[in-house]
Image (cartoon, rainbow, N blue to C red):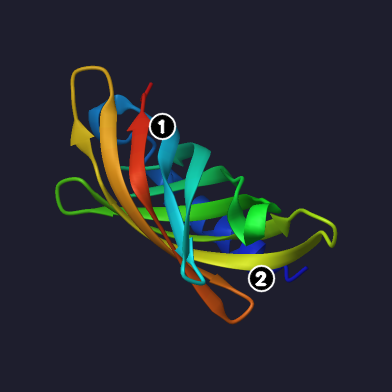
Amino acid sequence: MNTLPIVVLIVLCTVFTFDAKAKDGYQHFPGVFLGATHADSETDFTYALEYEYKFSQHFGAGLVYEKINDAHHGDGITIKLASIYYHFGHDFRLGLGYGEEKIGGYHPHSENITRVNLSYEYHFEHFSLAPSLSIDFIDGENATVFGLAFIKPF
């Protein structure tokens, strides 16, 4: 496995820890994502658990565990990502992630995945909703992931 993305993530996280509080004092942002993934002329239901830790008002890092049960003709896909995030404007978030896509079925195998993500957060009293669009780069192919994340900060 290429360790460069992990090293970059650790360095960036270390650099931006000097500003310890995020906007509104929240640092933990767990969420549930519901949406769809479009790849190879197929669109499949997608769900995920997400977590972001904000080091400052503008920077955070997180993890994503995503499932696409019907992808690859029913073989299913599990994605595990580590991401860094940059928050800009009023409520926009740009993310860059790297991880593993594991394909099930009779010939299971894993591939590296790189994800670029853009989302916008709508804040309510005790939670946020974030429409999200991601482009995944997997072994020379692309997939588009779109949907809505339900976030409960603390």
Q: How many C-alpha atoms fall within 10 Å of the one at disc 1: few (<14), some, or many (≥20)?
A: some
Q: Would you say 92 lies left or right of 38 here?
A: left
Disc 1 to disc 2, C-alpha distance: 26 Å
Does the image show residue 99? no
Residue 70 in the image: state x and y as whole percent: 60, 49
Q: 56 or 105: nearer the eye?
A: 105
Residue 88 in the image: state x and y as whole percent: 22, 54
- 143 in relation to 69, above or below: below
Q: 22 or 46: nearer the eye?
A: 46
- Label 1 residue SS: strand
Residue type at mark 1: give it: Phe
Q: Would you say 138 lies left or right of 107 here?
A: left
Q: Would you say 93 lies left or right of 90 here?
A: right
Q: 126 or 133: nearer the eye?
A: 133
Give the residue displayed 43% in from the left and 38% down from the top. 33
- Label 2 residue SS: helix
Give the residue displayed 40% in from the left and 53% down from the top. 85
Give the residue displayed 29% in from the left and 51% down from the top. 119
Q: 128 or 148: nearer the eye?
A: 148
Q: Which labelled disc corresponds to residue 4?
A: 2
Give the label, 1 or 2, closer to the camera: 1
Residue type at mark 2: give it: Leu
Q: In what quadrant of the picture does the C terminus appear?
A: top left
Give the residue displayed 76% in from the left and 62% down from the top. 110
Q: How many C-alpha atoms fall within 10 Å of the one at disc 2: few (<14), some, or many (≥20)?
A: few
Residue 1 in the image: state x and y as whole percent: 78, 68
The quarter of the picture where residue 9 lies is bottom right
- 74 in relation to 65, above or below: below
Q: Would you say 15 lies left or right of 63 here?
A: left
Question: Would you name the residue on which mark 1 appears?
Answer: 29
**Which residue is most to the right?**
106
